[in-house]
Image (tube, grey):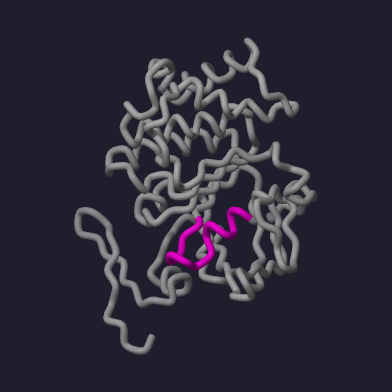
Amino acid sequence: MTNENPIIRVENLYFSYNREPALADVSFRVEEKDFLAIIGPNGGGKSTLVKLILGLLEPDSGTIRIHGKPPSKTAHCFGYVPQDVNINIDFPITVLDVVLMGRLRQGGRFSMNRKDRHKALEVMETLGIRGYAERKIKDLSAGQRERVFIARALAANPEILILDEPTASVDTEGKTELYHLLRELNETKTVIVVSHDLMIVSSYVKSVACVNQTVHYHPNNEITGAMIEMGYQCPVELIAHGQPHRILKTHEDF
């Protein structure tokens, strides 16, 4: 039975950049403790949708409600891991310093206390990176850095964790480890992940939103060829022989 009070509700959403439509007539809902994968082609509006949910952009029309409130009133509900976390990794900052940044918004403070340090170390322990506390962020692997930025997002104990392409720079083994970690976090939090790792994602998530200007929401984790054709507007065939993967059919006026 559908919950009448979803954690996120999007209704009749429209958004454009310089009058060029990016999203049109978007409506869907996210239930508490859902694990939602947002998939779709580059330029289809995935990151734009995430930024609208976070309140980083304002819709042209339509509504977004988090627990019945607009995003501008619910920033404390979110932990966000953006796509470009590897930018400026040469900056001489330690892993603990990065995670502590997630505590800065607590009460509008810009200083740290013992409680903040304890919470940061606690989250790092949960994610298996406490031993890296004094290491420089630039000295970690891509997968380790991703865990650090997830820890930063979790430091404020958000209800909803949103990650934009969290495995873009991570090897296959690291991807599996990260999605396993996200599934564990999903036991207590709502998780939304933007991803192109279709086959890996389908093994972990609970629902899928195909985004290509509009949104096709699917309340299950099965990613089928028909779903991808709908979202990507491109003929796709899913096959498996040992390892599942996808191929594109010939483009003939599809």
Residue 175 drawn at (x, y percent): 34, 42
Residue farthest to the top, as pictured:
114
Which stretch is magenta? 38-51
Indicate the quadrant containing the N terminus: top left, top right, bottom left or bottom right.
Answer: bottom right
Please say whether residue 179 is visible from this viewpoint. Answer: no
Indicate the quadrant containing the C terminus: top left, top right, bottom left or bottom right.
Answer: bottom left
Residue farthest to the bottom, as pictured:
253
Residue at 68% across, 30% down: 105
Residue 27 drawn at (x, y percent): 67, 66
Judge left or right: residue 143 versus residue 69: left
Residue 182 drawn at (x, y percent): 47, 38
Residue 148: in magenta span: no
Please say whether residue 217 is visible from this viewpoint. Answer: yes
Residue 233 drawn at (x, y percent): 43, 76
Residue at 65% across, 68% down: 15
Image position of 83 with respect to 249: above or below: above
Image position of 73 with respect to 137: above or below: below
Of 83 and 74, the residue lying toward us: 83
Residue at 78% across, 44% down: 73
Instruction: Tell me where residue 139 sits by quadrant.
Output: top left
Image position of 221 with respect to 103: above or below: below
Image position of 202 with respect to 120: above or below: below
Residue at 36% across, 89% down: 253
Judge left or right: residue 237 versus residue 123: left
Of 245 and 62, the residue lying toward us: 62
